[in-house]
Image (cartoon, rainbow, N blue to C red):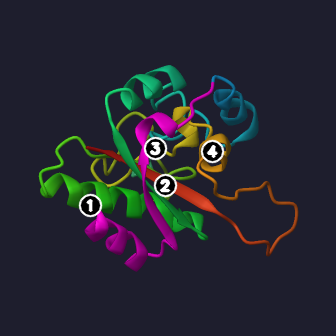
Amino acid sequence: MYGKYFELLKQGGADLAMRIEASSVVTAPWTIYKCRYGCGTYGKSHCCPPNCPTWKETQEILDAYRYGILFRCHDMNLVTPLAVEAARELFLDDYYKAIAFGSGPCKKCAVCNPDHCNFPGKTAPSMEACGIDVFATVRGLGLEIHTLRKKGETQNHFGLILVE
Ligand code: SF4
């Protein structure tokens, strides 16, 4: 059904892409704590809290969709641009509701403009910034994800496109 987009994602660096039910995406209220007290970009990015949807708003958004495309990259920097590109392609193919969620803070500009994004059509907030519990979501789908202790360990970063 979404084979064309799986291929686009794989050509862009994803090693896994799958269709999921939107209802399998888990949101949680504690995620904002990690941003506020664990990340230097809190309040400094258009795509980070408090400038992106809260976990409750994200849950409402999720409830408006039936499907998602979840994909995995081992390089975090690939995820957000790839999610945006795939969502754009879906939109142009008449999946007019397609929206993207990336991974990590947006790094498109040397200095972010949190109030007025310099490239609003070319970026997206991360799953975690919007209150998605990425670990619970991914593990619930039978995929592996772990916290990392050492440099050089394989990193698994995930992106999501909501579509129907
Ligand atoms: S595109 Fe630039 S201004 Fe917009 S969120 Fe990313 S870094 Fe910030």
In this picture, which residue range is highlighted in magenta? 1-28
Q: Quadrant of residue 151?
A: bottom right
Q: Which residue is mark 2?
A: 159
Could you give the CA–CA distance between mark 1 and mark 2, rounded to whole angstroms? 19 Å
Could you give the CA–CA distance between mark 4 and mark 3, rounded to whole angstroms? 22 Å
Residue, far right = 149
Could you give the CA–CA distance between mark 2 and mark 3, rounded to whole angstroms? 10 Å
Decide if ligand 1 comes within 8 Å of the CB at mark 4: no
Could you give the CA–CA distance between mark 1 and mark 4, rounded to whole angstroms? 22 Å
Q: Which residue is mark 1?
A: 1
Numbered disc in front, either 1 or 3: 1
Query: Are the two marked residues, 2 and 3, in contact with CB atoms closer than 8 angstroms?
Result: no
Instruction: Give above or below for 24 relative to 161.
Output: above
Q: Residue at x 61, y 70 (%)?
A: 74
**Of callouts 1 and 2, which one flags the residue occurring earlier in the amino acid sequence?**
1
Query: Are the two marked residues, 1 and 3, in contact with CB atoms closer than 8 angstroms?
Result: no
